[in-house]
Amino acid sequence: MKVVTHAIISFILALVFYPIVGLYSTIIFFSGFIFDVDHLIWYYIHYKSLNITKCWEYCNGIGSHRDTKRMVRMFFVFHNWEFILVMLLGGFLWEGFLFIGIGAGLHLLLDIYDRYRIFGVVIPGSAIHYFLTKPKHF
């Protein structure tokens, strides 16, 4: 899903939460899209380049070509339920982590929906599932 879409939907969620949590809603807003930086991390690991444009073209190309085989091989460190669970549990230490988990959870749900819309399959957002199925990297 495009970063702009994540930002717009995260902004709406932050507005809903603002009357309840005040400025913590800004954490929900930013964590709803900032974690897409892990796409660039993945791209750097595999292509030794931090070129944001080329990374965006690569990831966008996978979606536009409906390349499920390449999609399931990609692991993004912030795009998994385990990361979100750690953030939510971290809320016991600092309540800001709870709101990071909420924003990141929204982000992951939107990406799962977008993958289903594009690829016609639900690609689980689980690090455990990813590593147990041992996809071959290219």
Image (cartoon, rainbow, N blue to C red):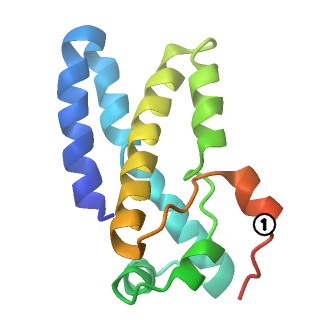
**Label 1: how many Cα within 10 Å (few below 14, some 14–19, many 20+):** few
Residue 44: where, in percent of width, then height? 61, 77
Look at 54% across and 62% down and name the residue there: 123
Look at 66% across and 40% down and name the residue there: 82
In this picture, residue 128 sits left or right of residue 21: right
Side (left or right) of 12 relative to 33: left
| Residue 123 vertical position relative to residue 22 in the rendered view, above or below | below
State which quadrant residue 117 falls in.
bottom left
Q: Secondary structure at mark 1?
A: helix
Which residue sits furthest front?
120
Q: Is residue 135 above or below residue 115?
A: below
Q: Quadrant of residue 136?
A: bottom right
x 63%, y 13%: residue: 93
Picture quarter containing residue 13?
top left
Q: Quadrant of the N terminus?
A: bottom left
Q: Count the labels in the image.
A: 1
Give above or below for 129 relative to 74: above
Task: Say above or below: 89 vs 108.
Answer: above
Residue drawn 40% across and 64% down? 116
Residue in front for this viewpoint, 15 or 105: 105
Q: Where in the figure is residue 30, as x and y percent of width and height?
A: 35, 40
Name which residue type carries label 1.
Answer: Thr
Relative image position of residue 55 (x, y in whole percent): 45, 80
Left or right relative to 111: residue 23: left
Which part of the image, by quadrant, shows the C terminus? bottom right
- Residue 51, how many percent across, how many down? 46, 81
- Residue under pointer 1: 133
